[in-house]
Image: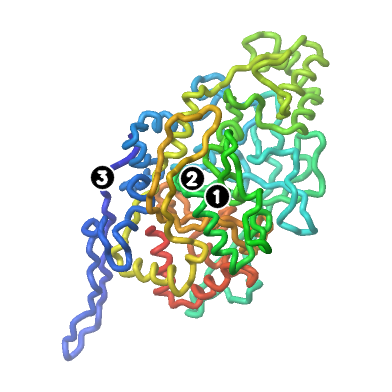
Amino acid sequence: MKINSYRVPLASLALLCLFSACSDDDSDPVVPEKQEPEAKYIGQAVGNFTAEEWYPGGALGTTQNTSSNCYEDNTPAVDDQGLSDLFNQGDLMASAKYTLNTEPYKGWGPIASRRSCEYCHSGGYAHGHSRSDMDPVKGNGYIVSVYYPDAPGSNNGTPVDQLTTFTMLQAVEPFLPPLDPTKIKITWHDVTAMPSGLPMKFPDGEAFRLRYPSVEIPQSAFNTNPKPSNYAVRLIASCNFQGLGLIDAISNEDLEAQYKAEGKFVQLNPELWDNAAKRLKADAYASDYFGKKFIKRFNYDLLDGCLENDVALWDELNVLRSDIKHICSTEAWAKAMSENSAVIDYIQRNGKSPFSDVHPYYNDGTREGIKKAVAYLLSPGDHVNLYNNPYFNFKPEMTDDAYHAFMVWHRGIAVPRARNLNDKAVQRGKELFTGALGCVNCHRASWTTGADNHGSSRILGSKQLPKYAKQKIYPYSDFIQHKLDMKNDIHGSWCRTTPLWGRGLSLINSGAEDRLHDARARNEVEAIMWHAYSKNSQAYRAAEKFYKLPKKDRDAVVKFIRSI
């Protein structure tokens, strides 16, 4: 059991010692009001917070733990529904370093993005950190979006078909990764002025800084045939995993109502929302294995509608499952490897032995025979069946039971309890965030989950997963994309509103608190002010109001965000 059921009160604020000079009238020094410990108030209504708001994930989705390992806790639902052993097994499937031969953590090949989930989501499945390289080491949660821009300088366009969604940066000998990470250059740039015209100092004189990354990938970095040309590149950092099952439990009807409510007043992403007819388009939905449709709600670019669509460990580590009969790759990479003389030479030299890692590609041992086997076995084509073919019949590396445990874990990660809600500054921050600033127009405070008739897959079928029906939750997101119009941003500047729950514990869990889709913001203030970078930002007015606040109120807003 990963959950800690005890309550961990945060230390009360230390008193600030104020010394005043002696005077003839011996006036008393000013002593600030003592802050009472939060333990006295946990689970109770206090100030402008309801009792429920101490538990952002509801009774079934919140861990009481707020210490440095809380991001890895399971939800109470996991325990209540008898799934603790499966959760713990799934947690190991997610965190173990995968190898070629060691069961049950077998896979990682012939190409992969990372060695485990924790390589990207380091520090308890947290948000990715900012970096200056693409080395596929633990702690680097970056992937690259490589696309053909739809106009010169555009941040949007069609993805190149030489790469998979999660950039494969590693390969098993003798194969080469589709993209050589050592040739990828990330450069960080400081912003000197914002197009919106707001100075980079608050009216009280306190300065703030903004920075953003650019990425360069030479054509020589692609080990594909053909290699792309005239492409552009952007960075994307990994998302937090906390509360994914709760987001999964929000009903289609409630999400659709949110679109309709917002679509009356602002333009929404035309790929998903018909701004003229005021209705969702077909592309706003994703289907599970059985054809049941769910409104997309996960990831910056809203790729998935239900968590069970997630094919993790297959699309990043290439761990084979019984329900997917080919590896995660591209035709351009399979073709390049089948035509690579060094690859053919290595397999011809080392592949005859049935104990060799490259034996599956040996075929009849001739160069032409090896070429045919490589081209087929590395292809992602629908015609490929790795379990039944003329070259080599693989076996699934992840059992159906192990995948079930993995999905229990994926759906069972808890949201940490809120902190400091008895603090007057936090209460003032909520007042501003939910009131005058208007941040909740996008960062919607609360939802009530539906019946949680979640999707499924062929493997899962009717197998039990943690369920979160009728829970009042506080993710602080509308799960809709809005345009922020930041320098070097992505996907036409449309980005899903990030859930804020639990993010204030990022530093003690992962060692960093970087924010936004490419980890450009180093703290909450930078993240907020990126919303005011351009007057085209749909959040400009809210961020401008924050900009004009006195420092005490700005600090209160930040403290509120860190407390929920």
The picture quadrant where one finds residue 272 is bottom right
Q: Decide which of 299, 182 is in the foreground and name it.
A: 299
Q: Is residue 562 left or right of residue 493?
A: left
> Which quadrant holds the C terminus?
bottom left
Count all numbered tags in the image, as a single digit.
3
Residue beneath disc 3:
6
Q: Is residue 557 visible?
A: yes
Residue beneath disc 2:
248
Q: Decide which of 409, 530 is in the foreground and name it.
A: 409
Q: Earlier in the sequence, mark 3 or mark 2?
A: 3
Other-residue count near label 2 (Cα within 10 Å), few / some / many at <14 / 14–19 / ≥20: many
| SS state under label 1 | loop
| SS state under label 2 | helix
Residue beneath disc 1:
297
Q: Label 3 amino acid? A: Tyr
- Disc 1 + disc 3, Cβ < 8 Å: no
- The residue at the far bottom in this view is 24
Q: Look at 23% across and 72% down and name the residue there.
A: 33
Looking at the image, residue 405 lies above or below residue 444? above
Q: Label 2 amino acid? A: Asp
Q: Position of residue 552 (x, y in %)?
A: 39, 74
> Which mark is in front, 3 or 2?
2
- Disc 2 + disc 1, Cβ < 8 Å: yes
Q: Label 1 amino acid? A: Arg
Q: Look at 51% across and 74% down and name the residue there.
A: 547
